[in-house]
Amino acid sequence: MEKSNMQKLMDKILSGDRRAFAQGISVIEDRRKGWQELLNEAYKNMNDHALIIGITGPGGAGKSTLTDKIITEYRKLGKKVGVIAVDPSSPFSGGAVLGDRVRMGAHNTDANVFIRSLGSRGCIGGISEGTKRVLYLFKTFDFDVILVESLGVGQDETEITNFVDVTLVALVPGFGDSIQMAKAGIQEIGDIFIVNKSDHPDAELFTNQLKFSFGDMPIEERPPIINTVASEGKGLDELMEAIAGVVPKEYARREEKTKRRIHIEIESEILEKIMDTARDVIGQKAKLVFDSENKITPYDVAAEIIAGISFQEK
């Protein structure tokens, strides 16, 4: 049987064809014709070779600069690096505004670094559905390290931890969002906490506040806190050492994370398909409820819509 176009594209990606890889990312991100077939092929062919590092934290924490410096450190070790940088979407196209690629421009000519900016597509924080899907394609390529830089300002920051091996949380002293995150129980998010821009006058105080936020957690279980000034390369050696130190423990949790990730993915797909199917009729039904003068309720309408949904693939 002759292979489909998506299977042929997958073969090229598996052979290390960068152009095919870039094309595949666009197919999945933009949900072009055949995107689900390609996603299925990626899922079947992905491997666990690459160390996947997530970088999250509020805007202004210097995540892109940190990512840029981490790329440099891994390249010094001869590692092939892939980067998924999630940029705020253009309000017109939904695509990335490419800010991260500009900030990491020094690596654009390196054949052993591949950087792709993805639009947030309405995701206000954490990791978007498009990012999760594209990550599967990255896991079919021959990267040694994959960096996933998230928006990091959403309400469910913990989700990224199920899609990466090591989660870095970047915070900055004297910055409102960082202070709020430090107070809001972020201990379960990060494997390593980075106090970036540590040349700030309040850096020591903020670092101590962050340590205090771990409360009664046993000292041996507390995540490392690394002080950096990423723009000057300060603290990068300590950060890389800390990453290497937590990798064995996090690799041991891969099976546990995979089980959670599969659950999340199935749930997300179901919810997305329901909304894709229902979106066209929701407006009509909402008007029906309004015109009925409370004789029909939103709950009646929701039950009717769900009952009429077919879960067969289109």
Image: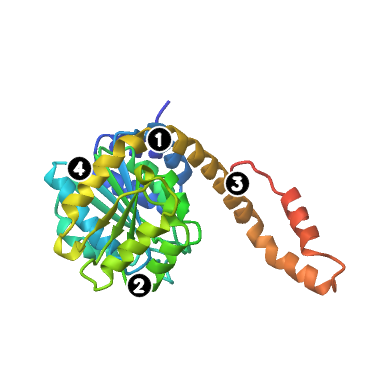
Q: Nearer the viewer, mark 4 or mark 1?
A: 1
- Residue position marked by numbered label 3 in the rendering: 270
Q: Residue furthest right?
A: 295
Q: Nearer the viewer, mark 1 or mark 2?
A: 2
Instruction: Mark 1 or mark 3: name the one nearer the start of the chain.
Output: 1
Image quadrant assignment for residue 13: top left
Q: Position of residue 88 (x, y in %)?
A: 39, 66
Image quadrant assignment for residue 289: bottom right
- Residue position marked by numbered label 1 in the rendering: 254
Amino acid type of the residue that numbered disc 2 sits on in the rendered structure? Phe
- Residue position marked by numbered label 2 in the rendering: 175
Assign the C terminus to one quadrant of the image: top right
Q: From what the image shows, is residue 251 above or below residue 75?
A: above
Amino acid type of the residue that numbered disc 4 sits on in the rendered structure? Lys
Q: Secondary structure at mark 2?
A: loop
Amino acid type of the residue that numbered disc 1 sits on in the rendered structure? Arg
The CA distance from mark 1 to mark 3 is 24 Å
Using the image, tell me which numbered label, if any, was put on residue 80.
4
Is disc 2 in contact with disc 3, using a CB cutoff of under 8 Å?
no
